[in-house]
Amino acid sequence: MITLILGKKGSGKTKKLLDMCNEAVAQTKGNVVFIEKDTTLTYNLSHKVRLVAADEYAIRGFDNFYGYIAGMCAGNYDITDIFVDSTLKISGGIDGLLTFVEKLKALSDMADTNVVMSVSADPSEIPEEIAHLAREI
């Protein structure tokens, strides 16, 4: 399952994502991963969460990003949830979001992994093909 948390900068997307992540780690029997651009949120997450700083792995663009997430799922069948903060900062912009989400949806279904991403955008900026996956803050 894919969920997009939408809202403008400062609207509370990161706080919502952190709450969802900490709740997921308390309930799952598998592994939870949190991907952010840098290491800003290190102390806001449970120590049971695998925190990944995209900058440390030179993740740039949607193709890179998809490959990285797919590799994580291929290497660890126990990942139940992946949370991504600042999706557009990591990927470089909104162009390509539709294709990325569609590929990620197929991966999520195959790997039986929930993916929740924060996207700094207004609902009107999101392609209508993926608008049903969005929740506005």
Image (cartoon, helix red, strand yellow):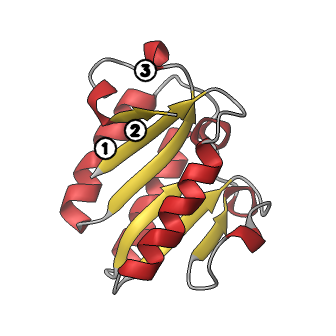
The picture places residue 30, in percent across and down from the top left corner, at 36, 83
Disc number lying in front (2 or 3): 3
Cα separation between marks 2 and 1: 5 Å
Taking the image as shown, residue 107 lies to the left or right of residue 23, namely: left
45 shown above or below 114: below
Residue located beneath label 3 in the image: 126
Quarter of the figure with residue 28: bottom left
Residue plotted at (56% across, 65% down): 34
Q: Residues within 10 Å of mark 3 (few under 14, many from 20)?
A: some
Q: Residues within 10 Å of mark 1 (few under 14, many from 20)?
A: some
The picture places residue 110, in percent across and down from the top left corner, at 19, 62
Cα separation between marks 2 and 3: 12 Å
Q: Earlier in the sequence, mark 3 or mark 1?
A: 1
Residue plotted at (42% across, 71% down): 24
Residue located beneath label 2 in the image: 100
- The reply to whether discs 2 and 1 touch (Cβ–Cβ < 8 Å) is yes
SS assignment at label 1: helix
* Relative depth, front residue between 49 and 73: 49
- The reply to whether discs 3 and 1 touch (Cβ–Cβ < 8 Å) is no
Residue plotted at (37% across, 33% down): 134
Disc number lying in front (3 or 1): 3
Residue located beneath label 1 in the image: 103
